[in-house]
Amino acid sequence: MKLKVELVPPESRKERPEDPLSLEFGSVFTDHMFAMFYADNEWKNPRIGPYSNLSLDPAALCLHYGQGIFEGLKSYRRGERVFLFRPRKNLERLNASAIRMVMPQIDIDFALEALIELLRVERDWIPELKGSSLYVRPTMIATEPKLGVRASHTYLYYVILSPVGPYFKEGFSPVKIMVSEKYVRAADGGVGQAKTIGNYAASLLGGKEAMERGYSQVMWLDSHERKYIEEAGTMNIFVLFDDELATPPLSGTILPGITRESAMQIAQDWGYSLNERPIAIDEVIDGIKSGKVKEIFGTGTAAIIAPIGELYFREKPHIVGDGTIGALSQRMFDELTGIQSGEREDTRGWVFEIE
Ligand SMILES: *Cc1c(COP(=O)(O)O)cnc(C)c1O
């Protein structure tokens, strides 16, 4: 497949935001996007062109039955150097999500080449301020017009880019989370491990009710017993019990986060006893009360590390430690953001530099 590139003339390009701190996450988009189409059992017409509205039939299957998947990763700039963090992992996960949603596989080498080319075109859009980045959103949707419930025969894969400021604008700080026993994010045998669009729609009402009480995200429990912690908002979750760092196992209802996997490797390299094991919410609350729970943090591409300072459970707030950022959360944040932005040595071969 040959990639076509059609550039927006310089005089028609958008004005780039000057201050990355003023950017609201995911609200500004660059001048160009990548797109390719799937029909007759193959991908075709790969093209980098102007960022523009899609033309979709109102009966397109993605709009009715949620056959859609996505990815999220960040590109960083240091001077003239541009980096991605483990981009193949995202494309592999997109293919894993595609299998679950009965969607076609993409060629990872080709998709990566196309992404690199798109980033070369949009290099000037990558903010340089520490903590800021160009967020990359690969997306695949079912496009066939059909009201019968079945997998589509045609698809669109596209990549859009959005400059984002630091997640923690007033500095790295703890977040407050509400544990939900009412709603669940994902159930056994369902689609919780796929990055599929419907999972996020399912989480909105719980998120809204948490916000109304002054909490920024929901901590999700397992659907079966409401006994074990699974994820916090759209982040994976870690709990430090004395010297043991624990995170729930990938049981099928948890999104296999790339930040999660990276944090696990780093913690092991630092000598923590790391366990993927079921963690009961009662064990967490008891541990907060007894002082055995030293830290809780979330991991994900948007925040990288989000220290959790307070958990609200059964009508009561529980302050984790002294409610401030734990030492491991801080160290992990510094390490991961340092590696991702090219400031710290990358001894694990995670950073991918764009020439
Ligand atoms: C994307 C996502 C994560 C984090 O994955 P990363 O690869 O670390 O960004 C965690 N949970 C959910 C539900 C997600 O959608």
Image: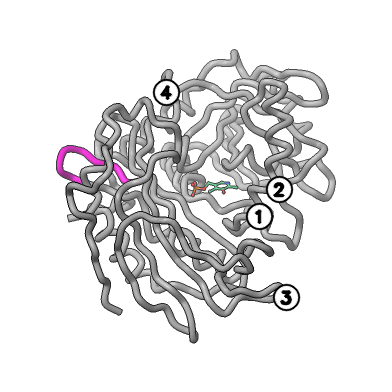
Residue 148 shows which numbered tag? 3
- Is residue 304 visible in the rendered structure shown here? no
Is 55 situated left or right of 291 in this image?
left
Residue type at mark 4? Lys
The disc, 1 or 3, on the residue closer to the chain's N-terminal end is 3
For the record, the magenta segment spans: 74-81
- Image position, residue 1 (x, y; %): 30, 79
- Please identify, in this view, whether the residue under mark 1 or under mark 3 is nearer the observer: 3
The residue wearing badge 1 is 198
Which element carries disc 1, helix, strand or loop? helix
The image quadrant that residue 146 belongs to is: bottom right
User: Can you say whether 264 is above or below 250 in the image?
Assistant: above
Mark 1, other Cα within 10 Å: few <14 / some 14–19 / many ≥20:
some
The residue wearing badge 4 is 169
Residue type at mark 2? Ala
**In contact (CB < 8 Å): disc 3 and disc 2:** no
- Image position, residue 314 (x, y; %): 82, 25
Is 35 situated left or right of 130 in this image?
right
The residue wearing badge 2 is 202
The disc, 4 or 1, on the residue closer to the chain's N-terminal end is 4
User: Residue at the location (36% across, 34% down)?
Assistant: 335
Q: CA distance from mark 4 to mark 1?
A: 29 Å
Mark 4, other Cα within 10 Å: few <14 / some 14–19 / many ≥20:
some
**In contact (CB < 8 Å): disc 1 and disc 2:** yes
- Please identify, in this view, whether the residue under mark 3 or under mark 4 is nearer the observer: 3
